[in-house]
Image (tube, grey):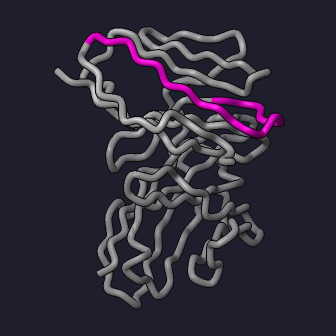
């Protein structure tokens, strides 16, 4: 079993749609959790950290369930510019483990 | 946020030659640098972890004699792909963590094409 797994994708959604990404991790010692966004042929960039209490940043909401070892990302009112690959990242100590990513295409 | 500068962004080289990729931390001391490789439509795969002043730790399946890592200072880490072959063509990217922090900052990546 892979350490971090994500929805296989790709997700093709119309502008304005709400889309949810799921991620599970296997290492219960994981300490920090993140969603990164990677545009084609670019480096990943931090989208948001994920906290147990859940956190929201504009149209983006992240949730963490430590008991189920599950992380989610919800994007509301999706924009064309949201098209990218979304990477679930789990950290323990100095180890960062990346999920395979889920590609999102927002269509006009 | 912290900045990691990676150079070159793109390189094309002939099979059998060596290519050096540099990553510099511009506004913090990068005690540890992570080197990743990403093949098309795949996720980032950790190749090795380098610590300043000591030998790098390589992930299983990564040849340490082929991918030479040097981390001689707190602001510079280099990856040299020796005797490159077409199958080494990939996107190589470095990353570091600010001391006392948890967020990873990435270099801009290097797209290597071996012909």
Residue drawn at point x = 71 percent, y = 18 percent: A65
Vertical order, B11 against B3 (above or below): below
Residue drawn at point x = 24 percent, y = 23 percent: A80
Residue A40 at x, y = what percent?
32, 45
In the image, farthest residue toward the left: A108
In the image, farthest residue toward the right: A29
Which quadrant holds residue B84? bottom left
Residue A75 at x, y = what percent?
42, 16
Relative to B24, B69 lies left or right: right
Residue drawn at point x = 44 percent, y = 9 percent: A58
Vertical order, A62 against B63 (above or below): above
In the image, farthest residue toward the bottom: B16
Vertical order, B71 against B43 (above or below): below
Vertical order, A78 against A36 (above or below): above
Please report the bounds of the magenta region as a residue range. A16-33
Relative to B30, B42 lies left or right: left
Question: How many labels sit on residues?
Answer: 0
Residue drawn at point x = 38 percent, y = 57 percent: B40
Residue A63 at x, y = what percent?
62, 16
Question: Which of the pair B31/A50 is nearer the observer?
Answer: A50
Residue A90 at x, y = what percent?
67, 37
Check if residue A30 falls in the magenta segment. Answer: yes
Question: Which of the pair B20/A42 is nearer the observer?
Answer: A42
Check if residue B63 falls in the magenta segment. Answer: no
Locate the C terminus of chain A by quadrant: top left
Relative to B38, A88 lies left or right: right
């Amino acid at each position: 079993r892979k350490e971090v797994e994500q929805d296989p994708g790709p997700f093709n959604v119309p502008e304005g749609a709400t889309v949810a990404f799921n991620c599970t991790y296997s290492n219960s010692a994981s300490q920090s959790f993140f969603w990164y966004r990677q545009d084609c042929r670019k480096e990943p960039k931090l989208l948001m950290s994920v906290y147990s209490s859940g956190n929201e940043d504009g149209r983006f909401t992240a949730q963490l369930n430590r008991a189920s070892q599950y992380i989610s990302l919800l994007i509301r009112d999706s924009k064309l510019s949201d098209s990218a690959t979304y990477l679930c990242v789990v950290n323990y100590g100095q180890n960062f483990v990346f999920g395979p990513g889920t590609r999102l295409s927002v269509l006009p | 946020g912290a900045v990691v500068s990676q150079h070159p962004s793109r390189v094309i080289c002939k099979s059998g030659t060596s290519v050096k990729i540099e990553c510099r931390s511009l506004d913090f001391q990068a005690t540890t640098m992570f080197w990743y490789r990403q093949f098309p439509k795949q996720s980032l795969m950790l190749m090795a972890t380098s610590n300043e002043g000591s030998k790098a730790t390589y992930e299983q399946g990564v040849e340490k004699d082929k991918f030479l890592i040097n981390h001689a200072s707190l602001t510079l880490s280099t990856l040299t792909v020796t005797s490159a072959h077409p199958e080494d063509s990939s996107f190589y990217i470095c990353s570091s963590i600010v001391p006392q922090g948890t967020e990873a900052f990435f270099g801009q990546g290097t797209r290597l094409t071996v012909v």
